[in-house]
Amino acid sequence: MCGISGYYSFHRNISSKNITEMNQSIRHRGPDDEGFWLSDGVDGRNFSGNDSTEKIKEGFPILQEEHSIIALGFRRLSILDLSEKGHQPMLSEDEKIVITFNGEIYNFKKLRKELEVLGYHFQSQSDTEVILKSYQEWGISMFVKLDGMFAICIVDLERQKIILGRDRIGLKPLFYSRNENGLIWASEIKAILKNEFIKPEINWNGVYTNFLFQTTLAPETCFKDIFSLEPGFFMSIDLKNQEIIKEKFWELSLQSNSTISEQEAVEKIDLLLAESVSEQLHADVPVASMMSGGIDSTLITSKSKPFKKDINAFTISYKFSEEEVKNASLVAHTLEIPHHIKSVSDEEVLAELKENIQHFEEPYSSLEVLTNAAEYAKKLGFKVVLSGNGADELFAGYSHSLKLNKWLFLRNFNFVRHFMVSKDQFSKKIKNYFSQDVMFDFFRQSQVGMKPSEAKSVFKSSIFKNINSDLKQYHLRETKDYKGYFEYDMKYSLSSHHVFRDDLSAMKYGVEFRYPYLSNDLIDCVASIPEYLRYNGIQNKPLLRKVAEKYVPGEVLKMPKRGFSFPLYNFIKNESRVRDFINTHLESLKKRNFFNAEIIDEWWQNQNDVYDCVKIWQLVTFELWYQKYFENL
């Protein structure tokens, strides 16, 4: 788990100040070591940095003022092979291939054995070296073999290629920007903005989807000409002519195996989850399980105990989370494992409110508790944390999915919206409901962001006229059953939203989150199970509940689904300092002439439920985002 950055200048050598500043901006991702590699496109040299270990400094000169057309930067969070042998950028024996890699490959031991049979020898115990030699043997075909989370950059001077790749689900972020001067990439947008070729500009199309979905839909970001490499894709850049080719190496299957029984499905999921937990527990540093008290995380913790007797668990406690904490404590007591509880007070949230919001590189509609979780894990001494994230998308865990069959029936009457002329709130709500024509619209409604009509009303007309509000480019395969919703959940709820937030939250404190529910085999297995076994429209996660029955107490199974986030609505209603904070930033936002001040005032003065506060918080976080990335660079 680390941070990577790099650039390729098309026309001229540029100063290494670019790569050192890019790397420094993501220092939080890897406090244990840093490294650099510079090249003229024919040969390359390794350099150490000010934060490199002493042994690395002995082996490589500290990077001063140099010029090159290609540069790679790396920040290391040491998880596997803590020695200098795991240092990056890592080179092949002939120094013609170099890799920087952020993430973890859980099947690297299996791949290593396969490569050893083919005659390869290894100098380290790291998964990075396995990826490097996998590329030497299989080229870009290696991507389909990797089970884990990764953002990879490979520079191949022999073939004159730069290759960027990202894991199937997008668990590790990878952003890039291309203009007439060159190609720049990094684990976080903060780093890209440090390059001399980049001047930050607002991408209003990205802001629009952000307001509708609580996240910007990949490949767009809220920055003009800065993109997210989509999950399951790799990008190849030809050093001879700067041609860029982007290809998909994996796609979620929607084909089911109609012959499997429920009992067989439960047993198979149980087995695959155990294998995934076992692989993801492997680390050369302490590992803990993060328990929220629900089915997902408590099942992961229970499955961890047989493989790691000294497993610890921790829980974040906050207002209205008493039942979750109680259930988490019950599971820890049953398993006889150490359980750490961190109570997050209003004071702590307020103290770091602005900093935490601005750490995210786009507007956001919530208060992220995961930053507190990562900070607490670090204080406890845990670098690696198992998370239950992904189970909701994989096993139909969100309550909105239970409304699917009703919507599929009622959309036959969508024509009634054309006869609704009233402007009151109830009529607007009904009209919005009967405007959901395709699965994409139904999924959007579940994300609790602004409605399209609300977003249109809040933008100044001079800005909105240049926004492409036709989002057909984001539509996926249209089905008349749960499979279509499943695909949207996996691509946009999980990949664009949750794991993106997870990564930024965890890496802010140099902590690695791992996701046992999101192994290659488990995803492929669940996707192949017939819909009637994993989705019944009545109860969320019916199949996972069957698996969990053997491992978690009945109290956990009965607990209703709750999101893992601070209660924003209650915070706004009952905390005057938060309202003052909002007022201050809304007043600042209104002066920018991006949004209609009268709509902002109307929304702020009419805070009746959680949906109303979400809209306001999106505007507040937009203002904070703008201040951070456009005024304070």
Image (cartoon, rainbow, N blue to C red):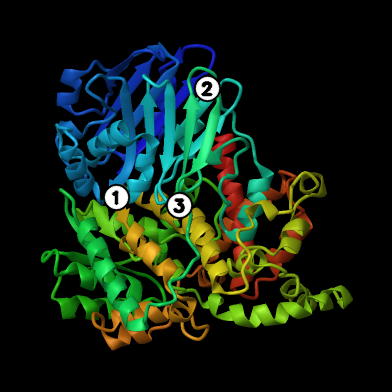
Instruction: Please state the horizontal and vertical placement of residue 629, each as a whole percent of the image.
Output: 55, 38
Q: Quadrant of the N terminus?
A: top left
Comparing labels 3 and 1, the label whose residue is closer to the camera: 3
The residue under label 3 is 500
Q: Is residue 403 visible?
A: yes
Sequence-wise, the earlier of marks 2 and 3 is 2
The secondary element bearing badge 2 is classed as: loop
Sequence-wise, the earlier of marks 2 and 1 is 2
Q: Crowdedness of circle 3 by 10 Å Cα count: few (<14), some, many (20+)?
A: some
| Alpha-carbon span between mark 2 and mark 3 | 26 Å
The secondary element bearing badge 3 is classed as: helix
The residue under label 1 is 511
| Alpha-carbon span between mark 2 and mark 1 | 30 Å
**Which residue: 28% across, 23% down?**
49
The secondary element bearing badge 1 is classed as: loop
Sequence-wise, the earlier of marks 3 and 1 is 3
Q: From the viewer's perspective, is residue 439 above or below residue 132?
A: below
Q: Is residue 508 visible?
A: no
The residue under label 2 is 196
**Which residue: 58% across, 74% down?**
481
The amino acid sitting under disc 2 is: Glu
Give whichever of 155, 55 is nearer the camera.
Answer: 155
- Number of numbered tags placed on the structure image: 3
Instruction: Please state the horizontal and vertical placement of residue 2, each as a whole percent of the image.
Output: 31, 40
Give whichever of 8, 270 is nearer the camera.
Answer: 270
